[in-house]
Amino acid sequence: MKIQLKFFGQLAEITGKEIVEVDGIEDTDSLVKRMLNEFPKLKSCKFQIAVDQKLLKQNQQLKSVSEVAFLPPFAGG
Amino acid sequence: MKIQLKFFGQLAEITGKEIVEVDGIEDTDSLVKRMLNEFPKLKSCKFQIAVDQKLLKQNQQLKSVSEVAFLPPFAGG
Amino acid sequence: MKENKKHDVFIHGPISPVFIADAINKHSKKTNIGAHDIFLGQVRNDVIDGKTVQTIDYSSYEEMAEKKFYEIREDAFNKFDLTCLHIYHSLGRVKIGEICLFVFVSSVHRKAAFDACRWIVEEIKMNVPVFGREIFTDETYVWKENTK
Amino acid sequence: MKENKKHDVFIHGPISPVFIADAINKHSKKTNIGAHDIFLGQVRNDVIDGKTVQTIDYSSYEEMAEKKFYEIREDAFNKFDLTCLHIYHSLGRVKIGEICLFVFVSSVHRKAAFDACRWIVEEIKMNVPVFGREIFTDETYVWKENTK
C-alpha cells in the first residue's frame, strides 16, 4: 500500500520536496531508517513523526496508514 | 489639632456626610470608639481605617495626622 | 528598556474596545516585546435576591487609590521582568457587558507577563480603595464586596 | 451558556488590533462574563549571531494543527469553567512588533480565565505543528524553535 510522506520546514529543505510517496514499508522504524539513508542530512535534525496526524510515541505498523509526516521543532505563538 | 475624617460608600450613607471634622482626639482607637458612639449603625459595617492614606494596622497616635478615612470593603475590578 | 512613567488610571465610564485596540497598537513600536497579557474585568449580570444587576457605579478614595496604583506598578516592575505596564479602571457607571478594568502587561518572554498580570489583578481587587454600587433594573442597589 | 463552536484559527498575516477590539466588543452581549484573559504573542526583534530578526514567516501542517487546536479547545472547556474561548494564529509573514497569536479566554470568575489562558498558550507552543522562519534584514533566515 502506498503511503504519502510529508516533510515540513527545514526537513523539506533537506529532502528537496514536501511530498514523497513510498510503498512496501512495514513500520515507522523501517521508514525512518530508510529516510535517514536516503537523506543523510536528516540525521543532524531534530524531528518528530506524525502518523495520520497523530504524534508517534513508539514504533507502529504502517498497514492501513495513509499519511506520515516528518515534523521539525514547533515554533508557534 | 483638627483632623478631617472621610467616609466612603455605605459608610457615608450611614454618617450622612462624606467629611466630618474632629478635634482633640488622641489616637485611632478613641476615634473609632467616638464614631461608633456617634453613628451606632457603623457597628454593623465592615470597614478599614486609613491614616493619611495608609491602611492602619494597629492603634496610632493622631498627632500631626491630617486625614483619617473610613473605608468599606473594596470592590474594584 | 522599561517604561515606568505614571499615567492616569481612572477613566470616566466604561473602557471601550477601541481604547484597548489603541493601547495594543502603540506597542507595535516596542519590538523587544514578545508577549502581552491583558486582563479585562467585565460587569456581570449577577442575580442577588432575585434581582438582576444592570450597572455598577464605581467610586473611590482617589488620592489613596492613585498612590496604591503607583505602588503596585513599582512593585510589579521590581518583582517581574516587565517591559510595559498599564492599568485603567472605570469610575462612575458601567453597564453589564462593559469593561471596567484593563490591565495590560508586556514582557520579552511570556512567563513574566502571565505572572505579573495575575498578581496585579489580585492586588487591585484586594488593596485599592474602589467602591461599587450594584444597581438593579428598578434602581435599587447593594454595595459590592470583592472576594478572594 | 458555553460557546464551543469551531472557527478558523489561522489568519493570513498579522492579527490587527482592530480585529482584537472587534472580538472584545462581540462579548459585550454575553453579560454572564466577568473576566477576560487575553494573550498576545508579538514578533520580537531577536538578535541571532549578530543579525536582527525582521519578520517571521509561519507555516503549518494545517490538517494536523486544526485537529490539535480543536483538541485544545475541547480539553480547555473540560478542564476549566469557561464561557468562551477563541484562538487565532498567523500564517505567512508577520513583522516585528506585529501580533502572531491571539488567545481570548472568558469566564464568570477570573481564576478560570487566568488558569486556562496560560495552559492553552503552553499547549499551542508545545503541541501544535506550526513552523517559523526568522528572517533577518538581509533576507537570510534561521528556523525558530520554541522552548519551555
Image: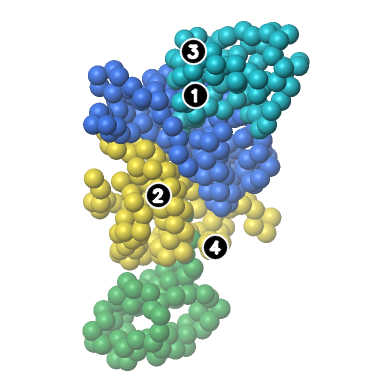
Chain colours: A green, B cyan, C blue, D yellow
Residue B73 is situated, as x and y percent measured from the top left of the image, at 49, 29
- Horizontal side, residue A48 vs residue D64: left or right: right
Chain bearing tag 2 is D
Question: What secondary structure is marked by label 3?
Answer: helix
Q: In front of the other: label 4 or label 1? A: 1
Residue C77 is situated, as x and y percent measured from the top left of the image, at 65, 40
User: Quadrant where the N terminus of chain B lies?
Assistant: top right
Circle 4 residue: D148
Q: In front of the other: label 3 or label 4? A: 3
- Asked whether disc 3 touches disc 4, contact meaning CB atoms under 8 Å apart, the reply is no
Q: Quadrant of residue A70?
A: bottom left
Disc on res. B43: 1
Circle 3 residue: B15
- Asked whether disc 1 touches disc 2, contact meaning CB atoms under 8 Å apart, the reply is no
Q: Amino acid at mark 4?
A: Lys
Marks 1/2: CA–CA distance: 36 Å
Q: In front of the other: label 3 or label 2? A: 3
To the question of a shared chain for discs 1 and 2, the answer is: no
Q: Amino acid at mark 2?
A: Ala
